[in-house]
Amino acid sequence: MGTSGAIRGRVLVVAIVAALIATACGASTSTSTPLAGIDSTLGSQGPSSGVTPSPATKPVKAPKPTPRPTAAPKPKPTACRGVIPSSLSALQGPLRLPLGPTTSAKLWYVVDGDTIRLSNGEYVRLIGMDTPETVKPGTPVQRYGPQASADLKRMLAGRSSVILEKDVSNTDWYGRLLRFVWIRSGTAWLQLDYELVVRGDARIDTIAPDIRYESDYASAERVAQAHHVGRWATC
């Protein structure tokens, strides 16, 4: 074989190799194209394409906080308006007799829970205690004021006179006599100042120097509070 024949043989081999390579490349291209088409088709189609999409994940709700326990309500007293035992009244209680000088006076009428008027026109302010206002000018009727007035009227009903006991002071700023007021029931004595406190009509209000029965009134007020009577009622 001459030189030209050798060259032609080499060219033939190169052509064959090139043809084989081209064939292989064409097969690779034809195989990948349908896959790309399928991918694009699936990407553009919705639920009607027959492919079931994965369900969307629902948001998880946060658990509700556990409510804080509330304190149990305190039980109310079974008797919101108690009754003072009769043995605790001044008639049989600690105030059996006046300790200071006394005078008898004619009663005219009851002004309010802690004031009376005598037949000579003088006013008497019961001392050592204080009841809610009912007739004070410029002051509205206060809670339990009418009850205190009614109780004092009941204790003095049918009586024409009272016994007045002086402590130290004679009169107050308004010119009223400052006195402890007593009544008699047979041989027993009843001090109205103390009685109004123990019934819950009045609160203790001792003002120096008139403090003779201060400790007795303090005990009476504790009794009234413990029994929930008058102004100390829980309902």
Image (spheres, rainbow, N blue to C red):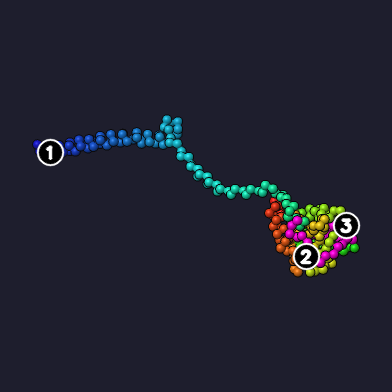
* Residue to which mark 1 is pinned: 6
Residue 142 can be seen in this image: no
* Residue to which mark 2 is pinned: 99
Percent coordinates x, y for residue 230 in the rendering: 74, 53
Percent coordinates x, y for residue 148 in the rendering: 79, 55
Q: Amino acid at mark 2?
A: Leu
Name the element at disc 3: loop
Q: Is residue 177 above or below residue 38?
A: below
Tell which of 213 and 114 is nearer to you: 213
Q: Amino acid at mark 1?
A: Ala
C-beta proximity under 8 Å, tags 2 and 1? no
State how far apart marks 2 and 1 are (Cα). 160 Å
Q: Residue at x 34, y 35 (%)?
A: 35
* Residue to which mark 3 is pinned: 160
Q: Residue at x 38, y 36 (%)?
A: 39
In this rendering, position of residue 171 left or right of residue 84: right
Image quadrant assignment for residue 48: top left
Q: Which mark is residue 85?
A: none
Q: Residue at x 45, y 32 (%)?
A: 47
Q: Residue at x 83, y 61 (%)?
A: 163
Percent coordinates x, y for residue 11 in the rendering: 17, 38
Q: Residues within 10 Å of mark 2 (few under 14, many from 20)?
A: few
Percent coordinates x, y for residue 172 in the rendering: 81, 67
